[in-house]
Amino acid sequence: MSATPTRRTVAVMALIPAVVALALWAFAWPAARIAPREVPIGIAGPASATAQLEERFEQREGAFDVHRYDDEAAARTAVEDRVVYGAVVVTDRGPHLLTASAASPVVAQLLKEAVTSQAPAGTPVPVTDVVPTPAGDPRGGALGASILPLALAGVAAGAVVTLLRLRGARAAAALVGASVLAGITAAVLADNWLGVLTGSWWAEAGVLALTVLATSAGVAGLGALMGTPGVALGGLLMVLIGNPFSGAASAPELLPEPAGALGRLLPPGAGATTLRSVAYFDGSAAGASVLTLSLWAVLGLAAVLVGARRGGRPAAATEHREATPAPVG
């Protein structure tokens, strides 16, 4: 047996366990370490009445980021604008909890348990779901489950464009066209058919398309600059890192660091945040995540165009050499 096949065999034997270990780390580690980390919540009411409750939340060091509001109306507005995940309104009859299960059913349940445990024994805590999950997705799982298909679609588009050797404007047009069609298709399925998205249809389709474009352009851009290894790197980054670190199934603030912060900087996490905003909160708090997606899309497409120019010269030189007759004798 020659040395080359032997090395390839050893490489495969070592690579598969490494990929398995990476996948288990990326998916299982964040899920096993879910806990509140600087989760923004609100407390509303007179300072004299809320001081003790605020102190109890702050005793859980690093768990909650407490925002103070004068009254229930201000706290409700903050929940609707995605400034906080929920708010506790202190009244003469006891605490009243405002939640937004559409922002994260997991955080809504966590807040309910936290406030109930701190209330005096036997005191009921009324809960108002200010922005509930839609009837088509009462547990909020469908939106989280949609992020992986979007990531896979983006990786597939970027890989196909690279493997088919599409370059320059043609590659960019293929990526944009595929992303737009993917966004429209996903919006039809998720909004019109399943009813899990309830916002502006065109805004949802735009976010879905932008998420796929950010992913596909990132993969294709890496492929244009690095070749096949770049496509593999992009796929690993988007699927094995971006998807489990997105926080779509829970919330970025519940993931261990640096997973929560890194997930927000990758297209799957930014796409999940933006989609929640446009689907349930009229676009509130979507600015940063839209900027993240746009940067991935623009930089990825720029890399595709730059890669085409860099690759065009060697290709042209090769064609010229092949077209030149070999000297006789």
Image (cartoon, rainbow, N blue to C red):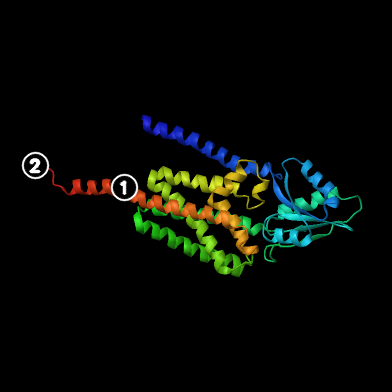
- How far apart marks 1 and 2 lie (CA) works out to 31 Å
Q: Quadrant of the N terminus?
A: top left
Residue 104 location, x and y as percent?
A: 69, 55
Q: Is residue 130 left or right of residue 9?
A: right
The percent position of residue 245, horizontal first and vertical second, equals 60, 46
Badge 1 vs badge 2, beta-carbon distance below 8 Å:
no
Crowd around label 1: few <14 · some 14–19 · many ≥20 (10 Å): some
Picture coordinates of residue 67, whole percent (x, y) = 73, 51
Tag 1: residue type? Gly
Q: Horizontal placement of 57 versus 270: left or right?
A: right
**Which sits in the foreground, 274 or 212?**
274
The residue tagged 2 is 328
Per the image, the residue denoted by label 1 is 311
- What residue sits 77% from the left and 43% below the top? 58
Q: Which mark is residue 321?
A: none
* Residue that protrudes farthest toward the left in the picture: 329
Q: Residue 216 at x, y = what percent? A: 46, 54
Give the position of the C terminus as an image quadrant: top left
> Sequence-wise, which precedes: disc 1 or disc 2?
1
Task: Classify mark 1: helix, strand or loop.
Answer: helix
Viewer-nearest of discs 1 and 2: 1
Where, by quadrant of the figure, is residue 200 drawn?
bottom right
Residue 154 in view: no
Q: Amino acid at mark 2?
A: Val
The residue lying furthest to the right in this view is 122
* Residue in the image at 60% along x and 67% along y: 191
Residue 309 placement, left or right of 130: left
Position of 230 relative to 102 (above/below):
above
Q: Say what secondary structure mark 2 lies in.
A: loop
